[in-house]
């Protein structure tokens, strides 16, 4: 089965403009008016969909990216078409000084961050016996340390306001493990521990920290898996299809909304029933 066929049962279109319209249809247009939202890895895939969703709901969006400036600018222009402000901000989430600089720029241009979505992530897969130091370090530094770096950089501003939402994008692989993905699984499992500890530290300041564990979502990351592997995965998904990035975006919107003010330290698996 091709990837197109796998997602065709899905009612979601993959056009970014439709992402904005679909989100507005559910949540209205003003849910995040005046809120400053940082989406790491907002240039492509799930992060792009999240950035557009929050832009569609009135947020001022900082679209972080690593190297793909053109893609980040495309995300910003989709948000601007919806009438919201967006800036592209390059920094490597694994580099704490670069993160601090990037956050300073966001604070100067948009204001202090109200909502942080830690979405930037990579996978450098290999069997454990063949795993190179560089593959392990790049994966853990980006996915786990990168998440921590961004949380730490925005925390003080949120504490001063006594308000904030942090949403960390982990993975079902962090819940179940996967042969050939030791570094990725360890980094994503680490995100759960980090999120629960932060949730405990910040709850009394009215800052909620939650985690989304996506299943297999149609993006560049899953396109790299190849058809055979995707078909194997599909057999394990009760919904019998891959997820669409907008389905993760809707969950992020819910967790960042006042509807989730009493939810913290939780993980929501958005995976078509894969891990139940
Ligand atoms: N797709 C899935 O099935 C799936 C399932 C479970 C979890 N997830 C998680 O969801 C998140 C997004 O996945 P995706 O499939 O949308 O990935 P993707 O299409 O490969 O996009 C990755 C994004 O992360 C950015 N990025 C990578 N390394 C970075 C770094 N060091 N600093 C800043 N930005 C960086 C990329 O920026 P550039 O464009 O500049 O390269 C890009 O915007 C990841 O954390 C992933 O682990 C995905």
Image: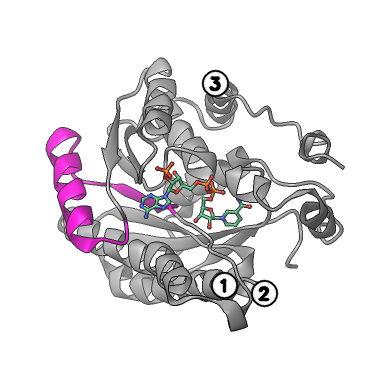
Relative to 11, say whether 82 is above or below. Answer: above
Location of residue 138 in the rendering, given as x and y in whole percent from the top left corner: 41, 66
Residue named by callout 2: 176
Extent of the magenta region? 93-120
Query: Could you classify mark 1 by the number of other residues whose Cα lies within 10 Å: few (under 14), some (14-19), or many (20 or more)?
Result: many
Ranked by sequence position, the earlier of labels 2 and 3 is 3
Residue named by callout 1: 185
Q: Which mark is residue 116?
A: none
Q: Is residue 1 found left or right of 233 in the rendered image?
A: right
Disc 2 vs disc 3: Cβ atoms closer than 8 Å?
Answer: no
For the residue pair 8 and 167, the one nearer the viewer reads as 8
For the residue pair 15 and 4, the one nearer the viewer reads as 4
Ranked by sequence position, the earlier of labels 3 and 1 is 3
Ranked by sequence position, the earlier of labels 1 and 2 is 2
Q: Which mark is residue 17?
A: 3
Disc 1 vs disc 2: Cβ atoms closer than 8 Å?
Answer: yes
Q: Residue at x 56, y 22 (%)?
A: 21
Q: Secondary structure at mark 1?
A: helix
Place residue 86 in its image quadrant. top left
Relative to 211, say whether 26 is above or below. Answer: above
Q: Secondary structure at mark 2?
A: helix
Separation of marks 3 and 1 at Cα, in angstroms: 33 Å
Location of residue 211 in the rendering, given as x and y in whole percent from the top left corner: 49, 62
């Amino acid at each position: 089965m091709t990837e197109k066929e796998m997602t065709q049962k899905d009612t979601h279109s993959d056009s970014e403009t439709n992402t904005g319209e679909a989100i507005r249809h559910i949540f209205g247009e003003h849910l995040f008016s005046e809120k400053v939202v940082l989406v790491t890895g907002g240039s492509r895939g799930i992060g792009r969909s999240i950035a557009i969703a929050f832009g569609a709901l009135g947020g001022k969006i900082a679209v972080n990216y690593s190297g793909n400036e053109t893609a980040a600018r495309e995300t910003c222009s989709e948000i601007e078409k919806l009438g919201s402000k967006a800036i592209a901000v390059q920094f490597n989430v694994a580099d704490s000084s670069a993160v601090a600089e990037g956050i300073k720029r966001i604070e100067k241009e948009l204001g202090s961050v109200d909502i942080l979505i830690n979405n930037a992530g990579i996978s450098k897969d290999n069997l454990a016996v063949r795993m190179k130091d560089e593959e392990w370090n790049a994966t853990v530094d980006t996915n786990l340390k990168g998440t921590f770096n961004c949380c730490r950089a925005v925390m003080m501003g949120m504490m001063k306001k006594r308000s904030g939402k942090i949403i960390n994008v982990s993975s079902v692989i962090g819940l179940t493990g996967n042969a050939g993905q030791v570094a990725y699984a360890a980094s994503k499992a680490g995100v759960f521990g980090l999120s629960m500890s932060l949730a405990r530290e910040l709850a009394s300041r009215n800052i909620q920290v939650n985690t989304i564990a996506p299943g297999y979502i149609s993006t560049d990351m899953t396109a790299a898996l190849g058809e055979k592997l995707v078909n194997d995965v599909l057999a394990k998904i009760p919904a019998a299809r891959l997820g669409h990035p907008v389905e993760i975006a809707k969950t992020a919107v819910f967790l960042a909304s006042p509807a989730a003010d009493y939810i913290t330290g939780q993980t929501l698996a958005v995976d078509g029933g894969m891990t139940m």
